[in-house]
Amino acid sequence: MVAAKRADFDAISQKYHIDPVLARIIRNRDVVEDKDIDRFLNGTREHLYAPGLLKDMDRAVDILLEKMAQGKRIRIIGDYDIDGICSTYILFRGLSKCGAAVDTAIPHRIRDGYGLNENLIQEAYDAGTDTVLTCDNGIAAYEQTAFANSLGMTVIVTDHHEVPYEEKDGVRQYRVPEARAVVDPKQEDCGYPFPEICGAVVAYKLVLALLAKKEETDWREAMESELGLELLELAAFATIGDVMELRDENRIIVKSGMELMKHTRNIGLKALMQATGTDAAHIKPYTIGFVLGPCLNATGRLDTAANALELFKAQDMEVAAVLAGDLKAMNDSRKELTLKGVEEAIRQIEDGGLDKDRVLVVYLPEVHESLAGIIAGRIREKYCKPVFVLTRAEDGVKGSGRSIDAFHMYDEMTKCKELFTKYGGHKLAAGLSLPEENVDVFRRRLNENCTLTDADFEEKVMIDVPMPMAYASIGFVREIARLEPFGNGNPKPQFAQKNVRFVGGRVLGANHNVGKYTVADEGGKKYEMIYFGDIEAFDAYVAEKYGAAAVDNLYHRGTQTAAVDIVLSVVYYPDINEYRGNVSLQMVMKYYQ
């Protein structure tokens, strides 16, 4: 599908001194107003929103300063994923800097489950804790907050998840825990300009506000301090790791944070980069999302996320190196277990007739419960359907869901919430617990309520501009870099051209998983094109359309007496290939038809 959003692209091009193609791409990202275009292109930390715009932020700061002055013990309770680990570290580091008597607790995925529970509250109370400060959780913890209140404890909630609600007569009635302060931009009466921030950014804003009030300065000065800059790195890391949309404030946080990571102030993060062979000078959202981040998630899945927290807390490079190596090894193990789980899920779907369901519910009792979300994501990619993967747990069945744009996972689960012992999430992802006998009922109810059409299951490839490859140049590629960082909400721009002739090719890589082709446009101009997709599927497609001899001729030029032209439409993006000091232009093929 070609994005066809309208604007005066020439005027935007002239005003902001950018190529008209970039003006089209920016409009395709729904960036329309002049001030928003300017911030998209030129946004800096100065454009971040004030912490005080978050509801209850000032109250939370005042309570914490009062508790610190009284010498009261504060316990931060986070979560076991990237966002929860980063949030916990940010708050711990910030409160420690302010002189608080503070410690941390991260729930154990299997023993505790997600978020607050009464055991965690009791443990905090028994340890002499006066105040519980949550991060990346707590917005749904009514009973747990009430229990803490009954013990005479103080609870401050910082979270970013959807506020739970009950629907009566078509009206949503939201329910917020009775904590002393609740800082969550998703609250109806919170006037924060951009509510789509992660838990770590909420925590980061709290620390900035706390530092500013304690030191009687402006929050912007706190942001530019050594501590403020270190914590911004972790806020950016979590924003990518929690797959937040890279729009508005998130875009600035990630762009600035990744620049700071090139010379990171955090010893643990530096050690993790070294353990994974990451080149800090060329760090990208992909690096965090698919190389560094999974190492943090793996420890929360297969062991305890406290290990990842200790990595960020490390003050000695040797200690950090050992912790980082352990995290990488655990992630390697997680990859193997995930692959086996995906294979079993596909077998169950194909052999059990589940592929006819509009919403897939797969029960894998033997799979480690911590892998359910990753497996659900892989299955969603394969079938382009909403997916829940359930596993057997100590007290019944636990699971995770991953959705498609047309299916609001949290809302659909709310329609059958009586089936769950616990559930939560948002539009595209969710978690749940339920009795084993409810698994089949859950599958049936989701599909009975489902209003998805066949069109919703078709993979939609959005093309920013139908652009001939001849328009691209090394200078154009470098100009596109102004639109970075790319990721969720700001995808890497994609272009398309018809009638591309494949002249020759070869397969590269240790696993023979990279295709390098010479292609020509209708005018006969030749280009280098790289394909990182499924080479076997590409060859099979070409063989079906043009015959096996055409495929053979493609890779062995001149060996066939009757060469057949292979002509395809391609979706691509231009890129720069740097090899041994040589710089050249190449096209990267994403899709073909």
Image (cartoon, rainbow, N blue to C red):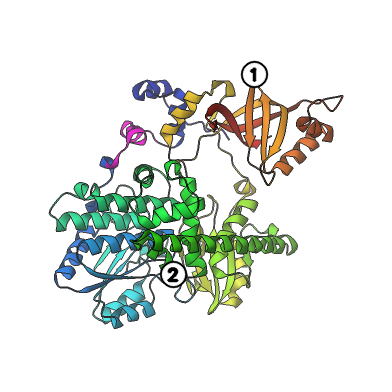
The picture places residue 488, in percent across and down from the top left corner, at 47, 46
Q: Quadrant of residue 554?
A: top right
Q: Nearer the viewer, residue 419 or 378?
A: 378
- In the picture shown, does residue 557 fall above or below 277? above
Sequence-wise, which precedes: disc 1 or disc 2?
2
Q: Secondary structure at mark 1?
A: loop
Under circle 2, the secondary element is loop
Q: Nearer the viewer, residue 528 or 134?
A: 528
Kindly identify which residue carries mark 1: 525
Q: Is residue 176 left or right of residue 417?
A: left
Residue 551 lies in the magenta stretch:
no
- Residue 384, horizontal then vertical, whole percent: 61, 51
Q: Report x, y in % for residue 178.
A: 28, 71
Q: Main secondary structure of the magenta part?
A: helix
Disc assigned to residue 22: none
Residue occupying image coordinates x 44% and y 23%: 19
Residue 498 in sight: yes
According to the image, label 2 marks what residue?
114
Identify the amino acid type marked 2.
Tyr
**Above or below: residue 411 compared with residue 405:** below
Residue lying farthest top?
Answer: 523
Mark 1 Cα shell of 10 Å, populated few (<14), some (14-19), many (≥20): few
The quarter of the image holding the N terminus is: top right
Give the distance between the C-alpha atoms of the residues marked 1 and 2, in whole angstroms.
57 Å
- Identify the residue at image location x=29%, y=64%: 92
Magenta range: 31-45
Left/right placement of residue 214 relative to residue 241 reads left
- Where on the picture, by quarter, is residue 372? bottom right
Q: Is residue 159 visible?
A: no
- Place of residue 41 in the rendered image (x, y in percent of width and height, measured from the top left): 36, 33
Q: Which amino acid does the dot numbered 1 rest on? A: Lys
Q: Are marks 1 and 2 in contact (CB under 8 Å)?
A: no
